[in-house]
Amino acid sequence: MRTSITTLERAFVLARSGNCGSIDNLIRRLDREGYNGRQVLGPVLRKQLRDLIKEAVKRR
């Protein structure tokens, strides 16, 4: 785990990367990297991340 960025910051980086096709994949990836994926909750945050994931997948 990189301690220089928070779990939520890492979630946004992953969402923008296009390497996670869904919120569930993103949370699993956070957990594998040593972050706390359970911090990714709430409908507004999840919508923001879903929208970023969709855009990133389109760009690929």
Image (spheres, helix red, strand yellow):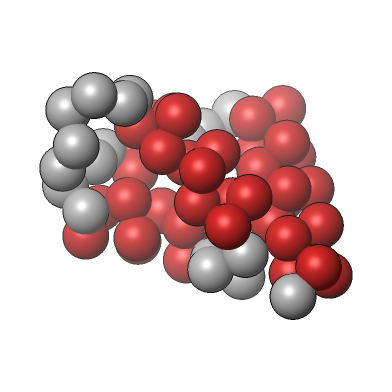
The percent coordinates of residue 3 (x first, y second) are: 17, 28
Which residue ends up furthest to the bottom in the rendered image? Answer: 60
Residue 39 is left or right of residue 33, and the answer is right
Whether residue 35 is visible to the viewer of this picture, yes or no, is yes
In the depicted structure, whether residue 51 falls above or below residue 46:
below
Q: Quadrant of residue 21?
A: bottom right
Residue 43 shows in this picture = no
Report the number of discs: 0
Give coordinates of residue 2: x percent, y percent.
19, 37
Q: Position of residue 43 (x, y in %)?
A: 68, 32
Residue 6: give x, y in percent of width and height.
Answer: 33, 25
Choose between 34 and 46: the one closer to the eye: 34
- The residue positioned 73% from the left and 36% from the top of the image is 48
Q: State whether residue 48 is above or below residue 22.
A: above
Q: Is residue 18 left or right of residue 60?
A: left
Judge from the rendering whether residue 22 lies leftward or rightward of residue 6; answer left or right. right
Q: Quadrant of residue 39?
A: top left
Q: In which quadrant will I find the C terminus? A: bottom right
Residue occupying image coordinates x 41% and y 53%: 27
Classify residue 1 by image quadrant. Answer: top left
- x 73%, y 60%: residue: 56
Q: Residue at x 34, y 60 (%)?
A: 29
Q: Can you say whether 42 is above or below 60 in the image? A: above
